[in-house]
Amino acid sequence: MEVKILATSDMHGYVEPTNYAEKNSDLPFGTEKVATLIKEIRQQAEGPVVLIENGDFIQGSPLSYYLAKNQRVGELTQVINALQYDVGVLGNHEFNYGLDYLKAAIASYNHPVLAANILDKTGQPAFGKAYELIKKDGLTIAILGLVTQYIPHWEQPATVKELTFKSIVETAKEYVPKLRAQADLVVVAYHGGFEKDLVTGEPTELLTGENEGYQLLQEVSGIDALVTGHQHREIATHINGVPVIQPGYRGSHIGEIILQVAQTAEGFKVSETQAAIHSVEGVAVAAEIRELIAPIAEEVEVWLDQPVGKVQGSMEITNPMAARIHEHPYIEFINRVQMAASGAKISGTSLFNNEGKGFGAQITMRDVITNYIYPNTLAVLKVSGADLRAALEQTANYLTLVDGEVVFNPDFIEPKPQYYNYDMYEGIDYVIDLTKPAFERITKLEFEGRAVESTDELEIVINQYRAVGGGNYAMFEAGKIIREIQIDMTELIANYLKEHPVIQAEANQNFTVLV
């Protein structure tokens, strides 16, 4: 008997094949295309098919942001319901809009939602269930749902204060033997990825516990198939004989694991396995999904086209790397918004990816939300001069020299680009000298015209993700937060533009990168 495990992950609210930079796009991703491909695979299947939604669906696109802003999550999750998943798994970004919104999303799904390693005060799974037993064609298939344990390092402390996030390895050691006794097949669906090279076993990142997929397959036996996500990678392989998939980002791919199962005197046994990912490039959109989302999508497009301000000069980003090396007017503008909203005299922000185009002469909500892509709020921290210097050393490490040219450090591009972890500051004057050894590159650091001493106390404003140490900024933590601005940055930007309808494109070049 052939059993197919299909999985999507990290679709991030991208239902239509657009990145919202312009209208009427037909890009190679989106739930509408995923739906078509799933339907085709189901129709061609010769045995049971299990469909898993592996997390990070309700956050990430302008569509999902708009619906969250208006507390209308059911209009987004109806899309997932139409695809008839067997189970879903929580992702880390499911927490971004708070627990009430998350709980509303879970309640709106027509399939079980799993998260075995997120526990409430009683030690029980806090959301949904730990696992699901699915019976198809005489088989019992167990799906164990796991989520990256690193969520407390990204979320507002109030959101996670009563929750315990356990290691997925520890959790799997508890559950997999139990599930082996109850089921013919055991599938682990993990919203997380791999911390080590899949071939050599060498670490590919700091071993923080954010990703534990490699360790899981070294220490836990009895897993027939592993679905992963979170890193937005495209993976179809075997590790220690276990088929593994990770299906990209925004609905660019569907992951497929095929298990050939034979009945023996001892029960069903897996005789052969395959792992594959299928691109949706060239796939037509599913008309029924497009019809379902069309009214909301049009509403979002009208909202995105609202004018919110004008620019004198140029805030357009034509070269993302150049904008990281020489202060760009868009970056200075974002820092100025953060300083105005918080009252802090020092601000740090990032150019999150290489897709943002900055602002043209006329700014619309589309420009705001396609450049500032995360639902960040702000936090003001009281830090020492030593903390600030350490943060700048950390950020300097995201740059490196190759043949005398400044490039983004390849260590932080593969397996997942981390452009969002390189920060640029306003309110201080500093120099990064890339000819110096790592963590000795800040050769100048001044605030208000004098050198910053290690014992100085300073207030800085950064986004909530960074404020609790996100991006391995260990010098920042929740205990150093002295106040928060509980308004989403996209709203702060729009509000700033209402107060300053015409802004100047300018940059004071307060930082320098030496080569």
Image (tube, rainbow, N blue to C red):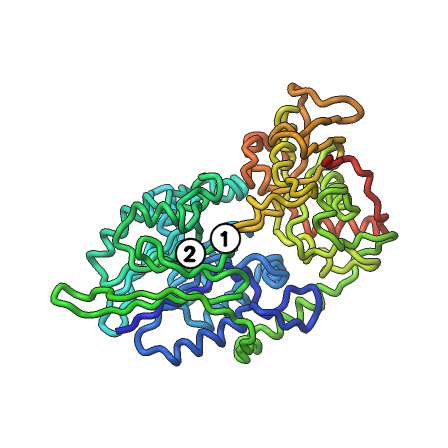
Do residues under tags 2 and 1 come within 8 Å of each other at their CB atoms?
yes
Using the image, tell me which numbered label, if any, was put on residue 299: none
Relative to 375, say whether 46 is above or below: below
Instruction: Find disc 2 in the rendering and name its residue.
Output: 228
Local crowd size for mark 1, using a 10 Å CA cut-off: few (<14), some (14–19), many (≥20): many
What amino acid is found at the position of numbered circle 2 in the picture? Answer: Thr
Instruction: Find disc 1 in the rendering and name its residue.
Output: 231
Instruction: Residue 217: give x, y in percent of width and height.
Output: 33, 50
Local crowd size for mark 2, using a 10 Å CA cut-off: few (<14), some (14–19), many (≥20): many
Q: Nearer the viewer, residue 315 or 444?
A: 444
Q: Nearer the viewer, residue 123 or 34?
A: 34
Instruction: Residue 278: give x, y in percent of width and height.
Output: 47, 69
- Residue 461 horizontal side relative to residue 222, left or right: right
- Residue 299 horizontal side relative to residue 241, left or right: right
- Counting the numbered discs, the total is 2
Q: What is the spatial separation of the Cα atoms under label 2 and label 1, in whole angstroms?
A: 9 Å
Element type where label 2 sits in the image: loop
Quadrant in which the N terminus is drawn: bottom left
Element type where label 1 sits in the image: loop
What amino acid is found at the position of numbered circle 1 in the picture? Answer: Gln
Name the residue rendered at 63%, 32% in the picture.
393
Toward which corner of the image does residue 109 lie, by quadrant? Answer: bottom left
